[in-house]
Amino acid sequence: MAYKIIFAPTAIARLEDIVRYIAADDPEAAKIFAMRLLERADLLSEFPELGTPYRKRKNVRRVRYDPYSIYYRVRRENRLIEVMDFWHSARVEPNL
């Protein structure tokens, strides 16, 4: 049975920022990128262990969709995936 995916407010705000930034140059590219980034996150519902463990925080994993990483937490007891943030790889790793 698939896990339910929820997005933290921080992740939603960051995704909006990403889309707004890309859309300033190419609105269609922004739409496509957001769709593909969310499709990558959606894979986690079927494959919650897809990402690698995040060394800075226990119980957090990271999956890449270049140039971004999706940081998430698996909550097995509730069958939830909590997407915590989307983070550009050129930036210093986040303190989640």
Image: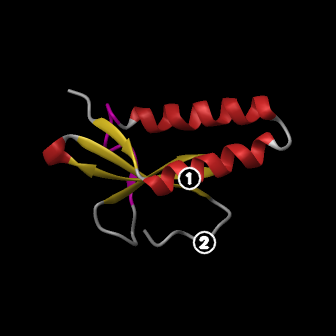
- The location of residue 5, given as percent across then percent down, is 35, 38
Callout 2: helix, strand or loop?
A: loop
Q: Which label is found at residue 92?
A: 2
- The location of residue 13, given as percent across then percent down, is 56, 52
Callout 1: helix, strand or loop?
A: helix
Q: Residue furthest right?
A: 25
Q: Quadrant of residue 43?
A: top left
- Could you tell me the amino acid type at mark 2? Val
Question: What residue lies at 40% left-to-right and 72% top-to-bottom?
Answer: 56
Task: Locate residue 5 relative to residue 95 in the image: left or right.
Answer: left
- Given residues 35 and 17, the one toward you in this image is 17
- Tell me the quarter of the image containing the C terminus: bottom left
Q: Is residue 77 magenta?
A: no
Crowd class of label 1 (few under 14; some 14 to 19; many from 20; radius 10 Å): few
Task: Locate residue 82 relative to residue 86 in the image: left or right.
Answer: left
- Given residues 67 and 38, the one toward you in this image is 38
CA–CA distance between discs 1 and 2? 18 Å
Q: Is residue 4 above or below residue 1?
A: below
- Tell me the quarter of the image containing the N terminus: top left
- Could you tell me the amino acid type at mark 1? Ala
Instruction: Check disc 1 and report the residue beneath it.
Output: 13
Q: How many marks?
A: 2
- The location of residue 85, given as percent across then percent down, is 49, 55
Mark 1 vs mark 2: which is more N-terminal? 1
Question: What residue lies at 75% left-to-right and 49% top-to-bottom?
Answer: 21
Magenta stretch prevailing secondary structure:
loop
- The location of residue 93, given as percent across then percent down, is 54, 69
**Which is in the foreground here, disc 1 or disc 2?**
1
Crowd class of label 2 (few under 14; some 14 to 19; many from 20; radius 10 Å): few
Q: What's the magenta region?
A: 45-53
Task: Locate residue 5 relative to residue 16 in the image: left or right.
Answer: left
